[in-house]
Image (cartoon, helix red, strand yellow):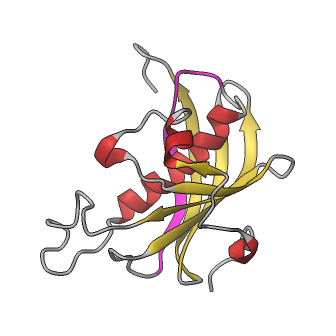
């Protein structure tokens, strides 16, 4: 059985996000094919969480090769979208410092349904633990048409040019 939703996102206006892709670019470093967010509709500063989304088009870089004639959004790209949302929060509120936020690990990841072009992937993130300067742990969930398609826990770590994880 899937876990309970981190946020009731039905009340947010996805047509008028708080942060558009242009706003996200001011905080997140990903560009071009690696940009996996379309907008952010809610930030819970006190509860340390947020709700964002990715509108998935037929032009995604993975559509022609995963799987030809039956394009499925790769699970690793779904996790990347969640990581970018968590990275936005961590960088905006300077939870860790560092030039970038990188993957430190993932746990209990479950892919529950396929995600296809033409879908809006709604992503929910909630911070569950912060070790300042060391790591942040997020729960994450993804939904398409109000059905949970993936969920798990990820660790974000600060990265600086010239350093290793």
For the N terminus, the image quarter is bottom right
Q: Is residue 156 left or right of residue 81?
A: right
* Dominant secondary structure (helix, strand or loop) of the stretch shown in magenta: strand
**Magenta segment range?**
97-112
Residue 42 pos. (x, y %): 72, 57
**Magenta run includes residue 109:** yes
Give the residue displayed 65% in from the left and 37% down from the top. Answer: 90
**Magenta run includes residue 104:** yes
**In this view, which residue lies farthest toward the top?**
162
Q: Is residue 30 left or right of residue 62?
A: right
Residue 147 pos. (x, y %): 56, 84
Q: Is residue 146 above or below residue 74?
A: below
Q: In terms of depth relative to the viewer, which is nearer, 145 or 25?
A: 25
- The answer to which quarter of the image holds residue 26 is top right
Residue 153 pos. (x, y %): 60, 57
Q: In terms of depth relative to the viewer, which is nearer, 100 or 138?
A: 100
Give the residue displayed 33% in from the left and 69% down from the top. Answer: 73
- The answer to which quarter of the image holds residue 117 is bottom left
**In this view, which residue lies farthest toward the right?**
46
Residue 157 pos. (x, y %): 56, 33
């Amino acid at each position: 059985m899937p876990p309970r939703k981190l946020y009731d996102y039905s009340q947010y206006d996805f047509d008028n996000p708080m942060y558009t892709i242009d706003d996200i670019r001011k905080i997140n470093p990903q560009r071009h094919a690696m940009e996996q967010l379309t907008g952010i509709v809610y930030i819970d500063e006190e509860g340390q969480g947020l709700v964002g989304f990715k509108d998935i088009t037929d032009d995604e870089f993975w559509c022609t090769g995963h799987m030809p004639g039956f394009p499925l959004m790769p699970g690793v790209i779904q996790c990347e979208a969640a990581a970018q949302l968590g990275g936005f929060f961590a960088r905006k509120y300077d939870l860790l410092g560092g030039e970038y936020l990188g993957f430190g690990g993932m746990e209990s990841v479950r892919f529950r349904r396929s995600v296809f072009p033409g879908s809006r992937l709604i992503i929910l993130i909630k911070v569950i633990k912060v070790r300042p300067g060391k790591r942040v742990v997020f729960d994450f969930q993804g939904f398409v048409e109000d059905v949970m398609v993936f969920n798990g826990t990820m660790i974000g770590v600060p990265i600086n040019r010239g350093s290793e994880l």
